[in-house]
Image (cartoon, grey):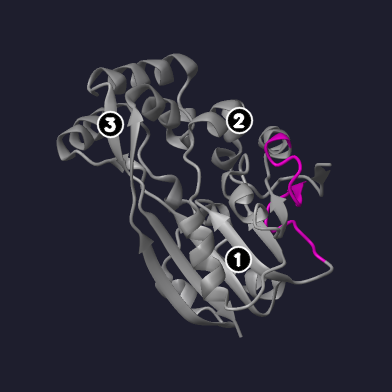
Amino acid sequence: MVTEQRELSGQPVRGLLFGLVAESYERYRLDYSNNLVDTVLAYAGRPVHSALEVGAGTGKATRAFASRGIEVIALEPDADMARVLKKATRGLPVRPVVATLEQFRADSRFDLVFAAAAWHWTSAATRWKQAVELLAPGGVLALFGRPAELKDPNLFAAVEEIEKRVLSAGDPAEIHPWSIEEMAAADGFADVEQRDLQSVATTTAADFVGRLSTVSAYLMLGPGERAEALRQVRAVLPDQVEIDNTLQLSLARRV
């Protein structure tokens, strides 16, 4: 069952574009590894039974944690994304909720709060305080994402040149950016760490372009402009490419 909590008036419009391509998002976005879950659980140092995910998307990270028996409440502000999330996590201990972090209310506290490439959509004014309030004492906040960029510097430069011409200025992370220093300075957290989980993925050019089609900067374009931008990117790529799949993981413990 997908639960809808309330209207999503506070969510940036750009953060509600992903539902337009929910099925493509599920198909082309990369999965998260067992190494990520192992690292978070080892850091926790105690059993993790319950988790709250912020910005679950179609459940890429949700499945990684729920497959370990962790009960996950998965917040996803886009109802179309939440429907794919529900389907993708069927049979796992997951409850999708259509809500932002700011709108969510809980009667209990969680062992883990995590966000996969979604923390920049949360409110800079309230997110750290909310995370502290949602965590049980000793609970863990885990924030992670990856560049998913081309490893070959020449290919990277060629795609970057196209994007400079066709995309609007600004990165989605600029909406509400955050840093490890900000996490460390937030009241209520200790043992703040940042780790890079190194990995390289090989994929087809078609799948790489498919992933770009789910990026908010491309979704801001009109359908014709988007198709042309993606055509230009595909034209400069070989049939297979290597992707920097390094996971940048930030961890903190609620005191």
Q: Main secondary structure of the magenta part?
A: loop
Q: At 32% from the left edge and 26% from the top edge, which residue is drawn? A: 166
Q: CA distance from mark 1 to mark 3?
A: 37 Å
Q: Position of residue 92 (x, y in %)?
A: 73, 47
Q: CA distance from mark 2 to mark 1?
A: 26 Å
N-terminal of the pair, mark 1 or mark 3, is 1
Does dot 3 land on a helix, a strand or a loop? strand
Q: Position of residue 153 (x, y in %)?
A: 17, 40
Residue placed farthest to the left in the image? 154
In the drawing, does residue 58 fall left or right of residue 147? right
Query: Foreground: 136 or 88?
Result: 88
Quadrant where the N terminus lies?
top right
Labelled pair 3, 2 in contact (Cβ < 8 Å): no
Quadrant where the C terminus lies?
bottom right
Query: Which residue matches tag 2?
Result: 22
Residue 136 is drawn in which quadrant?
Answer: bottom right
Q: Which residues are magenta?
A: 87-106
In the drawing, does residue 90 fall left or right of residue 223? right
Determine if residue 223 is in view.
Answer: yes
Q: At 80% from the left edge and 64% from the top edge, which residue is drawn? A: 106
Query: Which residue matches tag 1?
Result: 127
Q: Give residue 238's mark.
A: none
Q: Give residue 241's mark.
A: 3
N-terminal of the pair, mark 3 or mark 2, is 2
| Nearer to us: label 3 or label 2 | 3
Query: Foreground: 228 or 204?
Result: 204
Q: At 57% from the left edge and 75% from the top edge, which residue is drawn? A: 44
N-terminal of the pair, mark 2 or mark 1, is 2
